[in-house]
Amino acid sequence: MDSSIARKREQGRVRSEKNVAAANAAGLQVMLFTVDKPEDWQKMADAKVDAIITDDAEALVLWLRSRGLHLQIHDMKTGLKR
């Protein structure tokens, strides 16, 4: 059984980098879905989540590149992971 992924449906539940770090220390990855707005992407980047699942992967990739960031991206429309 793979318990390496922690998913939180409500974006508001990931409140800080400390919470993400605690999940990572417990051997979990924090992956948020479905995050489609730049202001929410920034919150997730600030909290240092492991991955963002989005319906707009192309826009997220451009947003990440413009800030020199890299995260796992799961495109819900195509099923592709980047």
Image: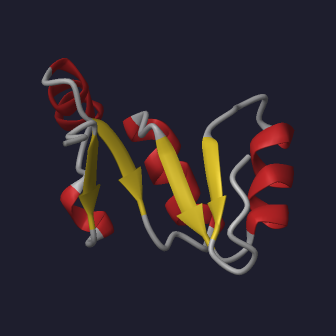
The image shows residue 48 at horizontal and vertical percentages of: 43, 33
Task: Please identify the quarter of the rendering in which residue 37 is found.
Answer: bottom right
The image shows residue 14 at horizontal and vertical percentages of: 25, 52
Farthest residue toward the top? 25
In-image side of 65 versus 14 (left or right): right
Judge whether 68 appears above or below 31 on screen: above
In-image side of 11 versus 72 (left or right): left
Task: Please identify the quarter of the rendering in which residue 74 is found.
Answer: bottom right
Judge whether 79 appears above or below 7 on screen: below
Q: Residue at x 13, y 24 (%)?
A: 26
Q: Residue at x 50, y 45 (%)?
A: 51
- What colour scheme does the image use? secondary structure
Q: Residue at x 81, y 65 (%)?
A: 59
Farthest residue toward the front? 1
The image shows residue 69 at horizontal and vertical percentages of: 70, 31
Q: Nearer the viewer, residue 10 or 46?
A: 10
Q: Nearer the viewer, residue 45 or 23?
A: 23
Q: Residue at x 66, y 77 (%)?
A: 55
Judge whether 28 appears above or below 42 on screen: above
In-image side of 61 versus 34 (left or right): right
In-image side of 24 versus 52 (left or right): left
Judge whether 23 appears above or below 36 on screen: above
Quick one: quadrant of the N terminus? top left
The image shows residue 41 at horizontal and vertical percentages of: 56, 56
Q: How many marks?
A: 0
